[in-house]
Image (cartoon, coloured by chain):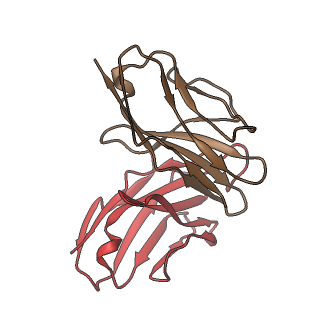
Chain colours: A brown, B red
Amino acid sequence: AQRVTQPEKLLSVFKGAPVELKCNYSYSGSPELFWYVQYSRQRLQLLLRHISRESIKGFTADLNKGETSFHLKKPFAQEEDSAMYYCALFSGGYNKLIFGAGTRLAVHP
Amino acid sequence: KAGVTQTPRYLIKTRGQQVTLSCSPISGHRSVSWYQQTPGQGLQFLFEYFSETQRNKGNFPGRFSGRQFSNSRSEMNVSTLELGDSALYLCASSMTSGGASYEQYFGPGTRLTVT
């Protein structure tokens, strides 16, 4: 079955602390993975995709096929990073995104 | 470029009624997908349209339907509304219908409340 798991509903850290938002997936084939972010009162927007291997707003994510993971990391969290983060898997056979349940990141001053 | 727009933004309906939601994609985008977002089930795929054709449908009852027009605008319809249909309905558009460059741009959503 194709599935995305985000084990943490809430991740609470202090400003300046490292952040790791976990994402595991189940997919037979070569996965295409994304991280989406939703800030308060804003629409869902793409943060980054694994294929581009770029860093956006200091966030990076590495695809680990052996562990079927695509964890999102940032070395020093900022208060403006507080948001809901969704990991998503593109299901090519069904032409759709499969989303995880999301993790709320709260960065405290 | 203007982003994805959805109308109306908020809607209150009564059980048994039907509702139509509208989505205007980014200019030039031919693929429109619809998602239902609820606190309990999260983001769930409803269906995707590309060039006026429904290419894929999620696991929702037949009461949920949609269509896409020649200008890529899309509508979704829910008939015989149930309380459980209360949700945020998101529309997303993309230039392609998959592939390595796949990127979906989301609208602000329509908040549907069924009483």
- Residue occupying image coordinates x 35% and y 72%: B85
Q: Quadrant of the C terminus of chain A?
A: top left
Q: Where, by quadrant of the figure, is residue B100 drawn?
A: top right
Report the front residue among A74 and B58.
A74
Residue B31 horizontal/vertical position (percent) = 60, 59
Q: Where, by quadrant of the figure, is residue A49 drawn?
A: top right
* Residue A61 visible in the current orientation: yes
> In the picture provided, is A105 more to the left or to the right than B96?
left
Q: Where, by quadrant of the figure, is residue B110 drawn?
A: bottom left
Q: Say if A39 sits above or below B61 in the image.
A: above
Residue B111 horizontal/vertical position (percent) = 30, 61
Q: Say if B81 sits above or below B70 in the image.
A: below
* Residue B28 visible in the current orientation: no
Residue A16 horizontal/vertical position (percent) = 40, 13
Residue B6 horizontal/vertical position (percent) = 38, 58
Q: Say if B57 sits above or below A35 in the image.
A: below
